[in-house]
Image (cartoon, helix red, strand yellow):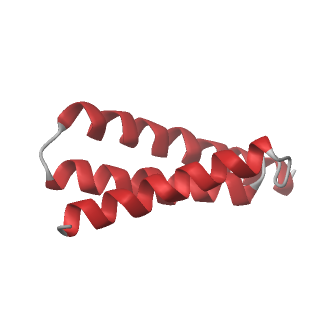
């Protein structure tokens, strides 16, 4: 396996574990754990996509990361209110 495979595999593994935790009701979908795992996983998958020059997946993962960051921002905003 090369570097992009390792980075992408780690990112996808984080995303899948986050999804599994939601399905098993171990973390709330609005919680910081889930959102942070989504940011990390999609960020790593985006880096791997950039490394292999695969633009469609890069766009998908960047949008996923931005949406997750928005969720984190909203959580922090609600907590401050």
The residue lying toward the viewer, choosing from 12 and 59, is 12
Q: Height in image: 66 above or below 38?
A: above
Q: Residue at x 30, y 66 (%)?
A: 6
Q: Residue at x 42, y 36 (%)?
A: 63
Q: Height in image: 59 above or below 35?
A: above
Expressed as whole percent of the image width and height from the top left, the position of residue 16 reads 57, 49
Q: Quadrant location of residue 8?
A: bottom left
The furthest residue to the top: 56
Q: Height in image: 68 above or below 79?
A: above
Left or right, residue 15 beside residue 8: right
The residue lying toward the viewer, choosing from 5 and 47, is 5
Q: Quadrant location of residue 48?
A: bottom left
Q: How many marks?
A: 0
Q: Height in image: 51 above or below 55?
A: below
Expressed as whole percent of the image width and height from the top left, the position of residue 45 reads 36, 52
Q: Quadrant location of residue 74?
A: top right
The residue lying toward the viewer, choosing from 34 and 79, is 34
Query: Is residue 52 among the parts visible in the rendering?
Result: yes
Expressed as whole percent of the image width and height from the top left, the position of residue 40 reads 49, 60
Q: Residue at x 37, y 59 (%)?
A: 9
Query: Is residue 73 among the parts visible in the rendering?
Result: no
Left or right, residue 59 beside residue 42: left
**Could you tell me which quadrant the N terminus lies in?**
bottom left
The furthest residue to the front: 1
């Amino acid at each position: 396996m090369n570097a992009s495979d390792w980075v992408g595999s780690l990112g996808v593994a984080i995303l899948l574990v986050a999804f599994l935790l939601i399905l098993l009701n171990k973390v709330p979908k609005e919680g910081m754990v889930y959102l942070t795992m989504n940011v990390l996983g999609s960020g790593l998958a985006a880096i791997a996509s950039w490394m292999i020059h695969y633009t469609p997946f890069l766009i998908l993962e960047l949008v996923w990361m931005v949406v997750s960051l928005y969720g984190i921002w909203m959580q922090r905003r609600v907590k401050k209110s």
